[in-house]
Image (spheres, helix red, strand yellow):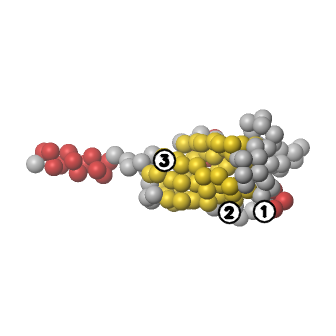
Amino acid sequence: MHYLLSSLIFLFVNPTPQQVSVEIVSTVAGGKVYLAVYDSAEGFARDAYVADAHAAMGAAHHELDLRLPDAGDYVLAAYQDLNGNGELDRNLLGIPTEPYGFGKLPPSKWRAPAFGEVMTRVSGAERIRIELRHWKEY
């Protein structure tokens, strides 16, 4: 009886890692794509991600596989580093000058989105598409 109870508690308390396939699509080939995954509004605001990946973006299309800690609500944010400096470049007004995107399209390009506005619910083996765009294309 004790073993059965322990097994049930283990199933409900321990998270089940989720395998997620992310398709990154851009209108521009080249550079490197960076992807960060956030599991809370606080983490999103502080840039404290729970998973990340990066890869060369030789073509305008790339697949990344992620392993997330558990099913839940996540923000998947990506950008394409075209000049190889390892960061999302911005102009003097703070507007991104390199392609970027989220797992869910933000409601406005005139401000940074909130966690709930670009959040994606992950509940199993998922395939998520992120379209990287320049700011003027939103």
Mark 3–mark 2 distance (CA, rounded to whole Å): 21 Å
Which numbered disc, 3 or 2, marks the residue that appears first in the sequence?
Answer: 3
Rendered-image quadrant of the C terminus: bottom right
What is the spatial separation of the Cα atoms under label 1 and label 3, in whole angstroms? 28 Å
**Above-or-below relation of 98 to 107:** above
Q: Which residue is mark 1?
A: 138
Q: Which residue is mark 2?
A: 105
- Mark 3 highlights which residue? 68
Identify the mark at residue 14; answer none if there is no mark: none
- Residue drawn 80% across the image and 48% down it: 98
> Are circles 1 and 2 on residues that touch, CB within 8 Å?
yes
Residue 49: x and y in percent read 58, 42
- The crowd level at tag 2 (other Cα within 10 Å; few <14, some 14-19, many 20+) is some
Q: Is residue 103 visible?
A: no
Q: Position of residue 46 (x, y in %)?
A: 63, 41
Q: At 38% from the left edge and 49% from the top edge, which residue is drawn?
A: 16
Local SS, label 2: loop
- Taking the image as shown, residue 57 lies to the left or right of residue 67, namely right
Of label 1 and label 3, which has the lower sequence position? Answer: 3
- Residue 113, horizontal then vertical, whole percent: 69, 56
